Amino acid sequence: MQDNYRPAMELAQSRLRALDPRRVVTRSGVELLATEAGQQYRVRLLGQEYRVPIPEARVYSVVTDSPAGTSVNLVVLHYLSTADGSPITGNWIPFRSLPGGNVYEQAFRQQCLRPLIDSFGSYPEGFEQASLALGGEKVAMGDRSFTFRVLPHLPMACVLWLADEEQGAEVTLLYDAVAPNCLQTEDLAALGRMLAFGLIKAWGKRS
């Protein structure tokens, strides 16, 4: 782990260790499993399963049993300690409508939306294939759109508009309005990057 992220990681671990695991699972929707090594949380993030041993509070891939990267560690630990059990609303909001999101909207567009436009703006079939590979469910928005259960209590949507005579192709990422009850805006931006590059990676495997 990079040294500049170590204080954030240690703080996230400390916050999670201070919570009753029963409260965590009730509010976050994750599983609490008992193993020979002790209790652990099981979390699905973008279709991938991770385990978080208690009280270690470090995130491991279930498939490879290797430690997850820094971004996944921080997002999962923050979700476990922040999600307050609020129900999914079914209402979609853009990144700029998140608390403080308007300040970082341009960076979010460059880091998340622009790569999606470049990858899928002329390839709607590729967008559809990549979305299905990531477990997306088709919905009626834009020209192509899919929803994703990114975390147990947090859906996201990716919407593609194809180019026409008046404007070029466009992509947007939407969050269920419950998102601020699950994570801080910085972590929600990280989720946007994970979803964007997960789609691009899934398309790259098939192209």
Image (cartoon, helix red, strand yellow):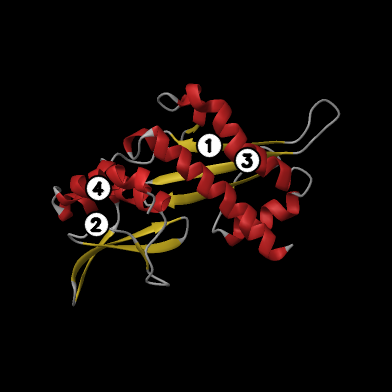
Q: Residue 7's spot in the image, x, y percent? A: 28, 43
User: What amino acid is found at the position of numbered circle 3 in the picture?
Assistant: Val
Q: Indicate the secondary structure of the residue bearing disc 2.
A: loop
Is 196 located above or below residue 132 in the figure?
above
User: What amino acid is found at the position of numbered circle 1 in the picture?
Assistant: Leu
Q: Indicate the secondary structure of the residue bearing disc 4.
A: helix
Which is closer to the viewer, label 4 or label 3?
4
Q: Earlier in the sequence, mark 4 or mark 1?
A: 4
Where is the N terminus found, in terms of image quarters? bottom left
Crowding near the residue tagged with mark 4, few <14, some 14–19, many ≥20 C-alpha atoms within 10 Å:
few
Q: Which mark is residue 141?
A: none
Where is the C terminus found, in terms of image quarters? bottom right
Mark 3 and mark 1: span between their CA atoms?
A: 8 Å
Do residues under tags 4 and 2 come within 8 Å of each other at their CB atoms?
no
Q: Residue 155's spot in the image, x, y percent? A: 45, 45
Q: Which residue is the site of mark 3?
A: 159
Mark 4 and mark 1: span between their CA atoms?
A: 30 Å
In the shown orientation, is residue 146 left or right of residue 78?
Answer: right
Q: Which residue is the site of mark 1?
A: 174
Q: Which residue is the site of mark 2?
A: 57
Q: Earlier in the sequence, mark 4 or mark 3?
A: 4
Do residues under tags 3 and 1 come within 8 Å of each other at their CB atoms?
yes
Q: Nearer the viewer, residue 73 or 62?
A: 73
